[in-house]
Image (cartoon, grey):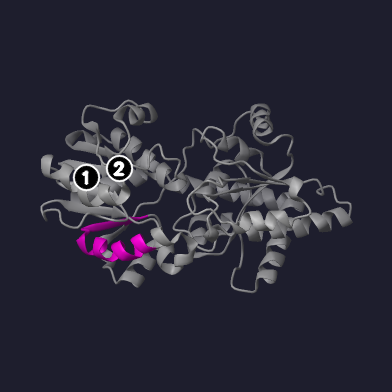
Amino acid sequence: MRIAIDIRKIGKKSTGDETYTFYLIKELMRLPRSREHQFFLLTDESPQKITEILPILPDNFVVYQVLPANKILWTFYSLPRFLKQNRVDVLHVQYITPFYLTQKIKIVTTIHDISFRINPKWINKKDSFLLNRFIPPSLKRADKVLTVSEFSKKEIAEYYKFPVNKIVVAHPAVDERLFSFNSEKSDREIVKKICGNSFPFILHVSSLQPRKNVPLLIKAFRELKKEWREKNSQWQKIKLIIVGSREGHNFDQKIDEVLKKSSFRKDIFITGYLPMKDLPSLYRQAILTVFPSAYEGFGLPLLESMASKTAVLTSNIGSFVEVGKDAGTYFSLNKKESEIISEMKIKIRELIENKKLREKQIKLGQERVKKFTWPKMAEKILETYLSI
């Protein structure tokens, strides 16, 4: 079988989507059954850049640069033109599919979540228009849809009336070689290099889009700092480290607005984009990770925290509860903002001040993370290719 995969996310610093694509290719290369098939890895980058990022590619995995690179042109002109010149049996893309390919080409599309449909204001107008305009016809053309959680599967089926039997859940995972315990000394040095002597600290990692609810976390942290200072608590010097880039796609401008009003601004550090090699040190050194998202398709940072032996506090949205189960601690978003902030503050305080509770959650997290592996995901996706 000849299988074409859109790998444009690799090398683009696009957080979860890039991680998903990178490990899909990496693990497909290791599967014995993959040796029977030819893989076309399609990108708008130079093949040299991709081969520098990916491990050594076997002969049946070949990188092709497809141009022009403009997103819309790539999907509706560059890609179809390439496929006319190069016969494939299966095409795997993310979200929007080309519409006018021959029916002989079976199409699989990955849809991580449908946040753009739930609340178009979470992303910019252009992205919202494109996704809401082109996802419905993409689903009509798709032979199978891959997604990352049972929660997302249910949402896709419900909102688009798409057949449940054509949606396949393949859970992402973490790279255990990165997110396993390392020497505390080397980790502390990396953290110091990134954000100075910020110990102890609470950690948040995300793309900093509006649906991540970072302003709520900053407000809860601000109130907690004030409370600890008034009580002269041992935790009054705690910091908040936020990993994410202001230059990222759909950055939440309210973050800067809240920071300007914060009396504890010096205790809040936004790192910007960090390479994957540095991120584990922050996870391992954090006393707690907090993720107050309003909507997620999966929740990879939860697994990364658990693999790093760090306790996790999240909003009680469907995908987070599905991923974390009893290894996570949760707060509700279904109330007024002041009440959300109050509950978040209480839960943060409980986890930080109660070491036994933290250790219990860490132990549960270590067991929970074992259920998610990249080889399982790649195997499920290869089965999907072969089933159509």
Q: In this view, does 122 lie above or below 370?
A: below
Which amino acid lies under the numbered mark 1 shown in the image of this protein? Ser
Q: Nearer the viewer, residue 256 or 331?
A: 256
Which residue position is annotated with label 1?
78
Could you tell me how far apart the alpha carbons at marks 2 and 1 are, in whole angstroms?
Answer: 8 Å
Which amino acid lies under the numbered mark 2 shown in the image of this protein? Ala
Q: Is residue 33 visible in the rendered structure shown here?
A: no
Instruction: Give the main secondary structure of the magenta stretch.
Output: helix
Q: Is the residue marked by circle 2 packed among few (<14), some (14-19), or many (20+) residues within 10 Å?
A: some
Q: Is the residue marked by circle 1 packed among few (<14), some (14-19), or many (20+) residues within 10 Å?
A: some
Find residue 108 and report its horizontal and vertical position in percent.
24, 53
Query: Residue 43 vs residue 295: left or right?
Result: left
Find residue 179 and report its horizontal and vertical position in percent.
53, 37
Residue 69, disc: 2
N-terminal-most mark, 2 or 1: 2
Q: In this view, does 88 lie above or below 170?
A: above
Find residue 360 and report its horizontal and vertical position in percent.
65, 51
**Callout 2 touching callout 1 (CB < 8 Å):** yes
Quarter in which the N terminus is drawn: top left
**Under tag 1, what secondary structure?**
helix
Q: Which of 379 and 102 is in front in this view?
A: 102
Q: Is residue 29 visible in the rendered structure shown here?
A: yes
What residue is rendered at 39% in x and 58% in y?
127
Find residue 155 and report its horizontal and vertical position in percent.
39, 67
What residue is rendered at 59% in x and 68% in y?
333
Query: Residue 181 vs residue 371: left or right?
Result: right
Q: Give the range drawn in magenta.
A: 129-147
